[in-house]
Image: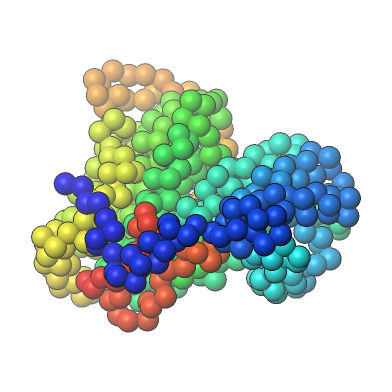
């Protein structure tokens, strides 16, 4: 059964707002009298204004200058803009974390992003916290710009807002400027706030995550590095996908280069270097387990060759506490060994919506939650200090050797590539072992998409739906 929300399901105030917006659009520009393309935004007038500013700044790289300028000329509203941000306009630059492929700092941006234009001046947000991300071992600007391009495709769709590009003159490195997420990575949130998360709030987190994944898959793309370190939270139930460096079209697959975090990787990715949208779904199953139990997959064993082999033979992580059968069945479907038998992101989104909005299913889940609560009276949540010293939760390139694979479908023995020595550079794992200061402390700040305004109540849940309308449910 699929659940679709219609305007009839919306509160009267939202129906009225949407009706007015549809009938009047964004009004007309007071200067050129053409229709505005966004709220307080005229595309022709702002394009001219940006063009007049081109000779007042430079990144000292022609490709980056051209990239920024093209985006500015095409912007139909303020949220589509990126800027060249002088490093001198940033203060209190502080190191946060080092991940698999990047280094992250926090800083204050004195000006803030452009909120709107009145055809005379740009009105800015003012001083705000931002995140600076530099890519390690960058050989050319194409990889740097490709990650920005990927992330810009999903701006406003449960992904992270990018404000622009800057350059650290001391290190002579370019950095992506993004919004700072107060609660950091999903892993950090679970470490610090798990006991405050009700089952309803956990459901809301999962719904927001799968909504973002649905948007990625809808555009014919795969994330390819989907784990709790690449999801950030501005508020406890506001989760956004980030880190699109490995994001690729479904038609692009390079079996010779296998990247990722082993516990989240599907058997077909480890065994054959094969990655599809169904591989992202397998990873989402691991994220579901983590959100519902607080425990990351395979936290207590080495992330080495033996684990990779066992995953390819069908190993699944232990479920450390009782969870409602509704969620358990979804997780098991995501972990199906055959990629063709896993649900799609669209199907997962519909199922999680039903849990919150379908009265019959909601009643069943409530009963299951009561049973789970009774069983979990003595439950001890995950302690980051108990993680195995050879468990690595940062993305990396996995080197290869040839070892036998046992085909689950017909028991014939094949050969595939697997890491020779997966335990490399344990320092890469310091963020998970020490409160997970996340590589991606960023978040989308699209003002038109604010949710979770009332998360103080024990069971209040604010859910992101396709129409970006706030709704509250109780579990």
Q: Quadrant of residue 86?
A: bottom right
Q: Number of labelled discs?
A: 0
Please name the colour scheme applied to the rendered image: rainbow
Residue 418 at what x, y percent from top left? 48, 30
- Residue drawn at x 44%, y 28% is 274
Q: Quadrant of residue 381?
A: bottom left
In the rendered view, does 460 fall on the left or right side of 37? Answer: left
In the foreground, 306 or 71 = 71
- Residue drawn at x 75%, y 72% is 110
- Residue drawn at x 65%, y 56% is 33
Whether residue 460 is situated above or below residue 97 in the rendered picture: below
- Residue drawn at x 32%, y 81% is 457
Residue positioned most to the front: 33
In the foreground, 279 or 366 = 366
Residue 50 at what x, y percent from top left? 77, 53
Residue 190 at what x, y percent from top left? 41, 67
Whether residue 177 is situated above or below residue 403 in the rendered picture: below
Residue 374 at what x, y percent from top left? 15, 73
In the rendered view, does 140 fall on the left or right side of 78? Answer: right
Q: Quadrant of residue 98?
A: bottom right
In the rendered view, does 365 fall on the left or right side of 78? Answer: left
- Say whether residue 426 is visible: no
Point out the image quarter for the C terminus.
Answer: bottom left
- Say whether residue 411 is visible: yes
């Amino acid at each position: 059964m699929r659940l679709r929300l219609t305007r009839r399901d919306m509160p009267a105030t939202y129906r009225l707002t949407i009706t007015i917006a549809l009938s009047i659009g964004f009004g007309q520009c007071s200067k050129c009298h053409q229709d505005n393309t966004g709220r307080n935004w005229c595309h022709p007038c702002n394009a001219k204004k940006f063009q007049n500013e081109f000779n007042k700044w430079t990144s000292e790289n022609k490709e980056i200058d051209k990239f920024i300028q093209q985006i500015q000329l095409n912007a139909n509203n303020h949220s589509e803009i990126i800027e060249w941000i002088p490093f001198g306009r940033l203060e209190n630059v502080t190191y946060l974390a080092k991940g698999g492929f990047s280094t992250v700092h926090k800083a204050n941006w004195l000006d803030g992003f452009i909120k709107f234009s009145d055809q005379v001046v740009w009105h800015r947000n003012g001083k705000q916290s931002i995140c600076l991300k530099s890519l390690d071992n960058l050989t050319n600007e194409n990889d740097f710009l490709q990650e920005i391009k990927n992330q810009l495709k999903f701006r406003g769709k449960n992904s992270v807002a990018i404000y622009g590009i800057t350059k650290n003159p001391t290190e002579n490195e370019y950095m992506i400027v993004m919004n700072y997420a107060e609660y950091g990575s999903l892993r950090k949130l679970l470490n610090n706030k798990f006991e405050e998360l009700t089952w309803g709030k956990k459901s809301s987190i999962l719904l927001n995550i799968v909504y973002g994944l649905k948007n990625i898959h809808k555009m014919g793309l795969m994330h390819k590095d989907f784990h709790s370190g690449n999801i950030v939270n501005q508020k406890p139930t506001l989760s956004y996908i980030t880190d699109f460096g490995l994001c690729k079209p479904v038609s692009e697959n390079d079996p010779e280069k296998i990247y990722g975090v082993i516990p989240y990787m599907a058997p077909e990715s480890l065994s054959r270097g094969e990655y599809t949208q169904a591989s992202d779904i397998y990873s989402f199953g691991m994220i579901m387990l983590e959100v519902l139990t607080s425990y990351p997959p395979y936290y207590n064993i080495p992330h080495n060759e033996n684990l990779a082999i066992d995953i390819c033979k069908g190993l699944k992580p232990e479920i450390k506490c009782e969870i409602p059968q509704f969620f358990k069945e979804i997780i098991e479907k995501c972990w199906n060994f055959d990629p063709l038998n896993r649900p799609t992101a669209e199907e997962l989104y519909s199922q999680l919506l039903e849990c919150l909005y379908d009265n019959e299913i909601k009643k069943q889940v409530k009963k299951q939650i009561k049973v789970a609560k009774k069983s979990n009276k003595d439950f001890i949540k995950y302690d980051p200090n108990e993680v195995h010293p050879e468990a690595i939760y940062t993305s990396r390139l996995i080197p290869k050797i040839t070892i036998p694979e046992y085909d689950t479908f017909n028991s014939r023995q094949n050969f595939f590539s697997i890491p020779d020595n997966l335990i490399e550079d344990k320092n890469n794992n310091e963020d998970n072992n020490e409160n997970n200061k996340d590589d991606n402390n960023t978040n989308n700040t699209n003002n038109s998409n604010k949710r979770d305004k009332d998360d103080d109540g024990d069971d209040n849940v604010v859910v992101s739906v396709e129409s970006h309308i706030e709704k509250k449910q109780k579990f």
